[in-house]
Amino acid sequence: MAMNPFRKLTTQPLTDALTLLPHHRRRDRTIRSDSPALEVMTDLAQTRLITVHAETSIDDALTLMIQAAVRLLMVVNERQQIVGLVTSRDLNGEKPIHYASRERVTRDAIRVADIMVRKAQMEVLQLGDVELARVGDIIQTLRASARQHAVVVEPNPGGDELLLRGLFSITQIGRQLGIEIEPSGAVQSFAELESVLNPS
């Protein structure tokens, strides 16, 4: 019997204000590709979000990631408003090298704001779509965007802004599928995941 094909969820430009959500803890569960997508989402109503100030040096941000055992930080300004995100690939990859060369500065002069993905460049998933999606749909969505993370938002019933509700990580999905994903490259990550989704 043929499996239902997975679908790419719709992303949209992040144009509205984005606010943090209160959190509570949750437990991880073993999942399958046809499990509900919510089972692999880091729900920020249950898990504390790690943030970094935009003016923090990239090496201090990397230290924070290592201490918190995360590979993505949401970036905030002095008013604690979300202004972007930064990943371990941003900090360890070519972005700092290119920035240092272009601006003629040393690595220790580079701030998170210099290399982060700015809010205007972020694309987000709506919680309503995620609630109807499967794990395989999220993998296909991440693959289509060539990203290792996805941000989930929901409307704030008490205001006009959006609430930052959740995060998807290709590494976390792989872990819950029972495979270890190296954060070095999206192509390798998706190949490993697809070997689990579509065994020969």
Image: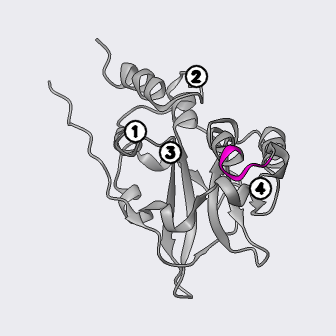
Is residue 52 left or right of 90 when viewed as pictured? right
- Taking depth in this image into account, of 110 and 2 the one nearest to the observer is 110
Which mark lies nearer to you, 4 or 3?
4
What kind of element bears circle 1? helix
What amino acid type should be assigned to the residue bearing mark 4?
Arg
- SS type, badge 2: loop
Mark 2 vs mark 3: in front:
2
The majority secondary structure of the magenta stretch comes to helix
The span picked out in magenta is 101-105
Q: Is residue 4 visible?
A: yes
Please name the amino acid that badge 2 sits on: Glu
Measure the alpha-carbon separation of dots 3 and 1: 13 Å
Q: How is the image coloured?
A: one colour
Tag 4 or tag 1, which sits nearer the N-term? 4
Alpha-carbon span between mark 1 and mark 2:
15 Å
Q: Disc 3 marks which residue?
A: 39
Q: Nearer the viewer, mark 3 or mark 1?
A: 1
- The spot of residue 141 in percent (x, y) is 36, 45
Which of the marked residues, 2 or 4, is nearer the chain's N terminus?
4
Separation of residues labelled 2 and 4 (CA atoms): 30 Å
Badges 3 and 1: C-beta atoms under 8 Å apart?
no
Q: Amino acid at mark 1?
A: Ile
Which residue carries the number 1 mark? 139
- Per the rendering, the mark at residue 180 is 2
Q: Nearer the viewer, mark 2 or mark 4?
A: 4
Q: Residues within 10 Å of mark 2 (few under 14, many from 20)?
A: some
| Label 1 vs label 4, nearer the camera | 4
Q: CA distance from mark 1 to mark 4?
A: 31 Å
Residue beneath the point at 70% across and 53% down: 103
The image's mark for residue 111 is 4
